[in-house]
Amino acid sequence: MIKESCLALISILIFSFFMAEIHGNKQGQVFDKFQKLKYKVDSQIDRSDFNAQEVVVDNHIVHSQKGLKEKDRIDKLPGQPHVNFSQYGGYVTIDKLAGRALYYYFVESQHSKAKRPLILWLNGGIYNIFLL
């Protein structure tokens, strides 16, 4: 009984593999026909170049940044010992009128600040920005 069910299962798997292969070949053939049809002279397919329009929206307002760096500096995290690197946390305003902002946490490298990368943590994102 077990042997027969295993044989049936293997047969179904092999059959489904070949069906997927046949379907893939049909898709490839349709694509080839489409490509050939596209280059026929009397074809109804639009072959014109795609021209993207450049949209520049320059309605952003840059507010004063004076003193914000030191205001966002974190001396010590609660329950954590003092560390020998600078860390900052605060909010970056996305839309002041709608009250949308991202929280950020920025940590400078402990050694070789100029050569090593930094860590930047942003809480929020597309779902938090645009949904209320």
Image (cartoon, helix red, strand yellow):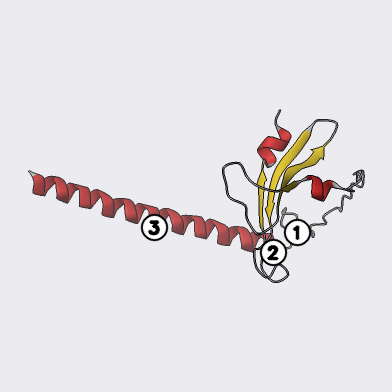
Query: Where residue 111 sits in the image (x, y, percent)?
Result: 65, 68
In the foreground, 18 or 35: 18
Mark 1, other Cα within 10 Å: few <14 / some 14–19 / many ≥20? few
Residues at badges 2 and 1 in contact (C-beta under 8 Å)?
Answer: yes
CA distance for labels 3 and 1: 31 Å
In the rendered structure, the answer to whether residue 97 lies left or right of residue 15 reads right
- Front residue of 1 and 106: 106
In which quadrant will I find the N terminus?
A: top left
Query: Hey, which residue is sitting farthest front in the picture?
Result: 82
Which structural element holds mark 3?
Answer: helix
Residue 42: image quadrant is: bottom right
The disc labelled 1 sits on which kind of residue?
Answer: Arg
Q: Is residue 51 left or right of residue 12?
A: right
Q: Position of residue 80 (x, y in %)?
A: 57, 47
- Please give the label number shown on residue 47: 1
| Crowd class of label 2 (few under 14; some 14 to 19; many from 20; radius 10 Å) | few
The residue pinned by badge 2 equals 39
Q: Earlier in the sequence, mark 2 or mark 3?
A: 3
Give the Cα distance between marks 2 and 1: 8 Å
Residue type of the residue flagged with mark 2: Tyr
Residue occupied by mark 3: 21
Secondary-structure class at tag 1 = loop
Q: Which one is in front, 130 or 15?
A: 130
